[in-house]
Image (spheres, helix red, strand yellow):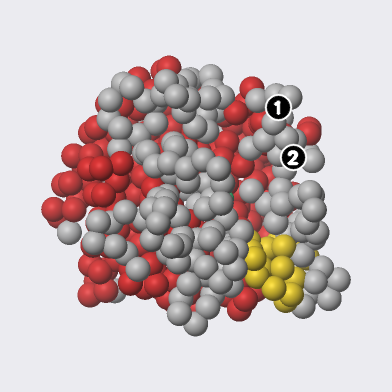
């Protein structure tokens, strides 16, 4: 394990060096991806050409702040806290718009407002995060016992849709209960997690992206392929949300069945891990085109490391070894350490059937950096 730690520390040195100038250059932005010249965009400024769910409400807008908090806890450089708070203040404006917010408030406010509160005790940040938690709890369908995903999507009735990604968002509810002493939030989180356990995880350990329930009766209707290859496939980032999300649920509740679920999906991922350590967009996609998702890779690696943190010594090594294989593939072959690009992790894909693939996504950098800190023994729990 010591050699893995030393390797992570070596890569973190490169991260610190790169993020020192990337953070300065983009201090007033909330980036998502880089343009053809390698410059970060600014989702907090997006306007007319983007649909109402984009712009400031864009679901990944918490990750830039999250990266800043990770660097702050490591370097203690106030600059990173200041930049993180730029995101936090901007995101508070989303409450005024309201309609653009949905299940992803966890992804938006955990790495920003909750991180700020956890690391600095900032009461204003706690207020913002509590607001987000209340909105998330309000999306719970009590008959189907799931948190509804998204809002209106053209040509789809999404009232009964639940998605695997939400296993991360429910951490905002666990936090709200832990902080307020009011069990309602974590009760909603656990009911949702139980529904996912029952309806998303297949016997082989792979998971569905979207499961549709009848919103009136709560009956399961069908599953959808979502961002993966198709119905019945195994969208890799979704597998990562499941491994890491169930491990987080275990960390918050101590319920063994959540850790068992995380391990089951982890074993599916490890069994399908290629020799190269490169992760496709979907474990069940055709061989060609060889579409990759380096972001899904980083989420899976983070999930494996989280699982490793909760199992007996004898079991740890297998999860850590698989995580390191994935992270090494990223660091050695999919990372840009130069000044040509603001992002580190390259070759990410939002979904299998999108027109564009292999670009940068800020949350790939977040999960990559977070996993390196975990491996180096310097992790902080932001979920
Ligand atoms: N949570 C949406 C995604 O992973 O793309």
Q: Pointer 2: what residue?
A: 100
Cα distance, mark 2 to mark 1?
15 Å
Mark 2 Cα-neighbour bin, 10 Å: few <14, some 14–19, many ≥20:
many
Measured as percent of width and height from the top left, residue 336 is found at 30, 32
Q: Horizontally, is 63 left or right of 217 in the view? A: left
- Of 235 and 328, the residue lying toward us: 235
- Contact (Cβ within 8 Å) of mark 2 with mark 1: no
Outermost residue toward the front in this view: 288
Q: Residue at x 77, y 65 (%)?
A: 160
What element does badge 2 sit on? loop
Asked which quadrant contains residue 185, the reply is: bottom right
Q: Judge whether 229 appears above or below 77 on screen.
A: below
Residue at mark 1: 49
Q: Residue at x 48, y 25 (%)?
A: 35
User: In the picture shown, does residue 333 fall above or below 169?
Assistant: above
Image position, residue 13 (x, y; %):
23, 33
The N terminus: image quadrant: bottom left
Q: Position of residue 178 (x, y in %)?
A: 59, 57
Note whether ligand 1 is within 8 Å of mark 1: no
């Amino acid at each position: 394990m010591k050699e893995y730690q030393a390797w992570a520390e070596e890569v973190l040195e490169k991260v610190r060096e790169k993020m020192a100038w990337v953070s300065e250059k983009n201090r007033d932005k909330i980036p998502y991806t880089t343009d053809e010249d390698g410059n970060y965009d600014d989702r907090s400024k997006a306007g007319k050409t983007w649909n109402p769910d984009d712009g400031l409400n864009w679901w990944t807008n918490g990750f830039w702040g999250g990266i800043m908090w990770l660097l702050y806890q490591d370097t203690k450089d106030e600059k990173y806290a200041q930049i993180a708070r730029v995101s936090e203040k901007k995101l508070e404006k989303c409450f005024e718009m309201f309609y653009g917010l949905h299940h992803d408030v966890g992804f938006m406010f955990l790495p920003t407002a909750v991180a700020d509160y956890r690391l600095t005790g900032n009461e204003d940040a706690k207020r913002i995060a509590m607001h987000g938690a209340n909105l998330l709890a309000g999306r719970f369908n009590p008959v189907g016992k799931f948190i509804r995903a998204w809002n209106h999507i053209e040509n789809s009735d999404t009232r009964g849709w639940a998605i695997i990604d939400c296993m991360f968002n429910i951490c905002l509810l666990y936090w709200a209960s832990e902080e307020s002493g009011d069990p309602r939030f974590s009760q909603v989180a656990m009911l949702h997690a139980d529904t996912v356990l029952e309806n998303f995880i297949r016997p082989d350990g792979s998971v569905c992206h979207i499961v549709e329930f009848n919103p009136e009766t709560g009956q399961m209707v069908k599953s959808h392929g979502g961002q993966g290859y198709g119905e019945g496939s195994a969208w890799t980032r979704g597998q990562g949300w499941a491994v890491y999300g169930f491990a987080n649920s275990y960390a918050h509740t101590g319920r063994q069945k959540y850790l068992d679920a995380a391990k089951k999906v982890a074993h599916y991922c490890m069994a399908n891990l290629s020799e190269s350590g490169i992760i496709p967009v979907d474990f069940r996609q055709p061989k060609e085109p060889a579409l990759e998702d380096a972001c899904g890779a980083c989420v899976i690696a983070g999930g494996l490391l989280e699982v490793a943190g909760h199992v007996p010594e004898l079991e740890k090594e297998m999860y850590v070894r698989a995580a390191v294989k994935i992270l090494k593939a990223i660091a050695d072959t999919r990372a840009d350490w130069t000044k040509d690009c603001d992002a580190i992790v390259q070759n990410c894909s939002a979904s299998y059937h999108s027109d564009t693939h292999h670009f940068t996504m800020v949350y790939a950098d977040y999960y990559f950096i977070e996993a390196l800190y975990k491996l180096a023994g310097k992790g902080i729990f932001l979920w």
